[in-house]
Image (cartoon, rainbow, N blue to C red):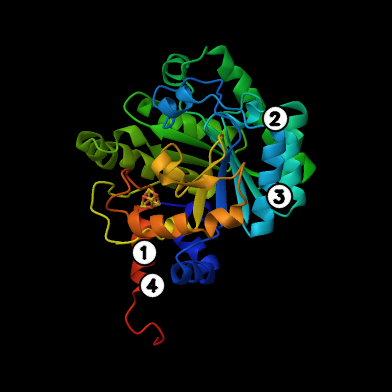
């Protein structure tokens, strides 16, 4: 079940005109951008989605480029920016200035972080600037934490402290930032699931999100396990926490089914800029040169998003051939059925 924060089908209605316009012109100014300001990381998660990519490129984007790209995002009509990875965004020394600037330009802001550096001045800036923060934490049991994240268990106590203090800060300062914990669940940390939900609740977070391990999405045994073993536990947790105004989110998507949509609608809504400045057609393809539309360090975002290459890739990259299992499988199909509705003007 998905809370309002994760219900992308509901959000599409807010941008339906933009989506239709994108379809007409075959180019798009996305609604949101995942922006990797660094590929460096202070964790070593064994199943990191971008492990190979960030091993090759350890780029820290220069501050002047970060600031120019943020201004460009706002002026071209992008609505939200997510400081994402790549690596760990808070490792970049310019992150506070970047968030302040994004806030001044009127962009909505999200942050994915492991929380290790969320303290002091940075924590204040995040509480003042971000609409949401999602902590990537996959275990609370010391030996599982170490095995999963590849770092010493002493860091867990540090992170626990940072998360608790951050939530106190937002409560006391009147900040509107919503914080939650996102955990990729697989066989290694499954026994920590209810402890993670409890940890998130006790630490003052608003939700716990159980996510598929994307490195295992082609594994039918894992998908069957998710459905038959993991999901009943998520549902139980969901009912247990619902009266406490705390949500437990998880997906019920069958990732192995064939996509119905013959066109990728979602990339018109969400794109990514990696730490080298490459603008990816879709955020899941940020590490693939063949899906890059241009480079935001050298070109304007307007020329990139309205250019011929975007138009060409729109026709070439479709859900059936994009080469990755799509986290937006259901959303693409939902938009396709709406766009292709018969007699749409009759209710
Ligand atoms: S993963 Fe593929 S289908 Fe999904 S949004 Fe990206 S390009 Fe489109």
Q: Residue 173 location, x and y as percent? A: 79, 42
Q: Is 236 in front, or is 58?
A: 58
Q: Which residue is mark 3?
A: 71
SS state under label 3: helix
Residue 176 visible from this viewpoint: no
- Where 78 sits versus 136, above or below? below
Cα separation, mark 1 vs mark 3, equals 33 Å
Q: Earlier in the sequence, mark 1 or mark 4?
A: 1
Relative to 235, residue 39 above or below:
above
From the viewer's perspective, is 231 left or right of 141?
left
Label 1: state its secondary structure: helix
Q: Position of residue 236 (x, y in %)?
A: 38, 42
The answer to which of marks 3 and 4 sits earlier in the sequence is: 3
Question: Mark 4 Cα within 10 Å, few/some/many (few <14, many 20+)?
Answer: some
Q: Are marks 4 and 2 in contact (CB under 8 Å)?
A: no
For marks 4 and 2, give the CA distance.
46 Å
Which residue, given by chain and number where applicable, does mark 1 sit on? 334
* Residue 219 placement: quadrant: top left
Look at 45% across and 34% down and name the residue there: 183
Q: Nearer the viewer, mark 1 or mark 3?
A: 3
Q: Which residue is mark 4?
A: 339
Give the Cα separation between the discs numbered 3 and 4.
32 Å
Q: Please determine whether, in this image, residue 131 is positioned above or below residue 19.
A: above
Tell me which label, 1 or 3, sits earlier in the chain. 3
x, y percent for residue 69: 66, 45
Residue 222 visible in the current orientation: yes
Which is in the foreground here, disc 4 or disc 2?
A: 4
Residue, disc 2:
165
Structural crowding at the residue carrying mark 3, measured as other residues with C-alpha within 10 Å and reported as few (<14), some (14–19) or many (≥20): some
């Amino acid at each position: 079940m998905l809370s309002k924060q994760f219900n992308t089908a509901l959000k599409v209605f807010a941008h339906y005109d933009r989506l239709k316009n994108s379809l007409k012109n075959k180019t798009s100014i996305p609604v949101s951008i995942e922006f990797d300001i660094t590929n460096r990381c202070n964790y070593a998660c064994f199943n990191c989605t971008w492990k190979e990519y960030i091993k090759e490129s350890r780029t820290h984007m220069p501050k002047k480029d970060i600031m120019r790209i943020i201004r460009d995002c706002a002026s071209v009509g992008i609505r939200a920016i997510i400081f994402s990875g790549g690596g760990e965004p808070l490792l970049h020394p310019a992150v506070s200035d970047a968030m302040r600037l994004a806030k001044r330009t009127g962009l909505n802001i999200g942050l994915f972080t492991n929380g290790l550096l969320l303290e002091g001045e940075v924590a204040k800036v995040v509480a003042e600037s971000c609409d949401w923060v999602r902590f990537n934490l996959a275990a609370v049991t010391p030996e599982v934490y170490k095995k999963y994240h590849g770092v010493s268990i002493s860091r867990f106590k540090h992170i626990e402290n940072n998360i608790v203090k951050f939530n106190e800060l937002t409560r006391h300062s009147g900040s509107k930032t919503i914080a939650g914990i996102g955990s990729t669940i697989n066989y290694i940390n499954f026994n920590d699931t209810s402890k993670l939900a409890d940890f998130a609740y006790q630490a003052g977070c608003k939700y716990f999100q159980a996510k598929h391990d994307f490195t295992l999405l082609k594994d039918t045994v894992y998908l069957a396990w998710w459905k038959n073993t993991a999901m009943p536990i998520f549902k139980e947790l969901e009912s247990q926490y619902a009266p406490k105004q705390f949500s437990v989110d998880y997906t019920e998507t069958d990732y192995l089914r064939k996509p119905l949509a013959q066109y990728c609608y979602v990339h018109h809504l969400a794109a990514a800029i990696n730490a080298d400045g490459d603008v990816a057609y879709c955020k899941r393809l940020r590490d693939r040169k063949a899906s890059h539309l241009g480079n935001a360090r050298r070109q304007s975002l307007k020329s990139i998003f309205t250019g011929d290459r975007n138009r060409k890739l729109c026709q070439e990259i479709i859900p059936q051939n994009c080469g990755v299992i799509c986290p937006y499988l259901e959303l693409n199909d939902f938009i396709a059925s709406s766009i292709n509705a018969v007699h749409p003007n009759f209710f």
